[in-house]
Image: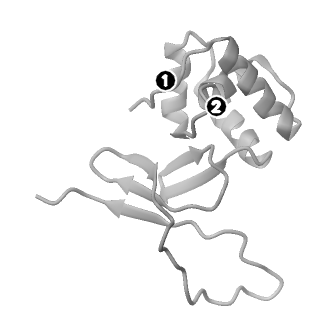
Amino acid sequence: MTDNLVPKNDLAGERGTEWLGRAGLRPTRQRLALAALLVGDGQNRHVTAESLFVSSREAGEKVSLATVYNTLRAFCDAGLMQEITVDGARSYFDTRMDDHPHYYWEETSELTDAPAEGMRIHGLPAAPAGTEVSRVDVVIRLRRTR
């Protein structure tokens, strides 16, 4: 599955450079290429490392899958993206950084934003001593009715 990522162009490259600069990340060739694909059109993205790897290859970038994984981790560590784990074997990386729920479409393995209006989370257990809740991820799994 490939996400419709934007091929590289001047505006995409500028947006990618600015995005990296906001986090103080060094703009390596690989980071710039992947950033342009992720934020080049100004839209938010949900990607897997594998889908970003395929998109980078389609855009003519010579980036290894290991580099894609490492770069996505660096983007998360810098606060540019957040990792959403759908199950133990599949992670998505989201460029939208505000708190919001997600739909996971089981038939297509696609992750999309879900509306937050009307959603309320009540009754979280108390965090263990010496800790605090940093975030609550809500993934709503969907499948089509037959």
Q: Quadrant of the N terminus?
A: top left
With respect to residue 107, does 72 lie above or below? above
With respect to residue 142, does 18 lie above or below? above
Residue 75 position by quadrant: top right
Give percent across and percent down for residue 20.
80, 32
Camera-near label (1 vs 2) is 2
Q: CA distance from mark 1 to mark 2?
A: 16 Å
Residue at left 62%, top 89%?
125
Q: Quadrant of the C terminus?
A: bottom left
Residue at left 56%, top 55%?
84
Give percent across and percent down for residue 120.
52, 79
Residue at left 21%, top 56%?
144
Residue 55 placement, left or right of 41: left
Give percent across and percent down for residue 101.
51, 62
Secondary-structure class at tag 1: helix
Kindly identify which residue carries mark 2: 39
**Chain-order first, disc 1 or disc 2:** 2
